[in-house]
């Protein structure tokens, strides 16, 4: 089964309503709440449904003064 993207249905409001049972405005308003719920779920559970047991490690002593993300971006460019 092929996936459907928001951008594909965004230009067809009636098909979007049929697919989601929500209008575009209702869906856009629900986005931040859904994102927060997803991140809360992923903080405690893995994608395969098992609980996260290993500690989350954070780079505390990064040699780059802007943090790890700037270091990764500089390596990619």
Image: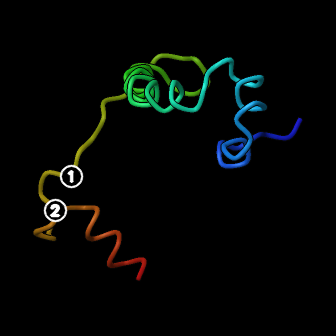
Q: Quadrant of the N terminus?
A: top right
* Residue closest to the eye, 25 or 55: 25
Q: How is the image coloured?
A: rainbow
Residue at x-position 26% and y-position 69%: 70
Residue located beneath label 1 in the image: 59
Residue 21, given in percent of the width and then of the height, sits at 68, 17
Report the side of 50 relative to 53 (left or right): right
Label 2 residue SS: loop
> Furthest residue to the right?
1
Q: Quadrant of the C terminus?
A: bottom left
Residue at x-position 43% and y-position 30%: 35
Tag on residue 62? Answer: 2
Report the side of 39 relative to 26 (left or right): left
Q: Give the CA distance from mark 2 to mark 1.
A: 6 Å
Check if mark 2's residue and mark 1's residue have beta carbons within 8 Å.
Answer: yes
Residue 73, given in percent of the width and then of the height, sits at 35, 72
């Amino acid at each position: 089964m092929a996936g459907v993207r928001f951008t594909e249905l965004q230009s067809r409001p009636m098909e979007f309503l049929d697919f989601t049972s929500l209008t575009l405005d209702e869906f856009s308003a629900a986005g931040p709440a859904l994102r927060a719920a997803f991140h809360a779920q992923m903080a405690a559970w893995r994608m395969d449904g098992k609980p996260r047991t290993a500690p989350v490690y954070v780079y505390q002593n990064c040699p780059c003064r802007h943090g790890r993300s700037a270091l990764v971006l500089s390596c990619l460019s």
